[in-house]
Amino acid sequence: MEGITEGVKSLHVSEVEYQKRNRIQVSNTKKPLFFYVNLSKRYMQQYDEVELSGLGMAIATVVTVAEILKNNGFAVVKKIRTLTVDMRDEGETRPLPKAKIEILLGKAENFDELMAAEAEGREVGDGEEHN
């Protein structure tokens, strides 16, 4: 019976770890927009889906990244979740509510073809630049 319990616990931990591995916490100040676009593509190649999340002012960046991926045919939106989380600033005694968004994106049907075409285009471009 203990073996079954251990197996169930490890299965649950693996699921939680999987969710953490394919989540990108977006900042609107730390990295440029297309850093998140390209990182999202790599995560979708590896995990088939990616979750973008952002707090406060980064919400606009999250939505923009998701729209770029969707409009270019790389991703489909599976789920959008909005919520408010309590955040404590240093020295503050009361928590302050902050808006948060989570957007779950999955691979589009032609994702692999688009990625191959993009890689091929990049290789051709690289070759021409060096001549």
Image (cartoon, rainbow, N blue to C red):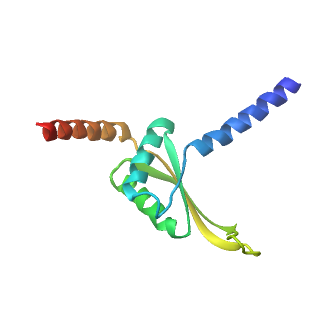
Number of on-image labels: 0
Residue 86: x and y in percent read 70, 68
The quadrant of the rendering that contains the N terminus is: top right
Residue positioned 44% across, 38% down in the render: 45
Residue positioned 43% across, 53% down in the render: 36
Residue 103: x and y in percent read 53, 56
Pick whichever, 122 or 63, lies toward us: 122
Where, by quadrant of the figure, is residue 125 drawn?
A: top left
Residue positioned 41% across, 44% down in the render: 41
Is 64 on the left-hand or right-hand side of 91? left
The quadrant of the rendering that contains the C terminus is: top left
Where, by quadrant of the figure, is residue 2 drawn?
A: top right
Residue positioned 13% across, 39% down in the render: 128
Which residue appears farthest toward the left when viewing the image? 131
Is 91 on the left-hand or right-hand side of 101? right
Residue 99: x and y in percent read 60, 70
Pick whichever, 71 or 124, lies toward us: 124
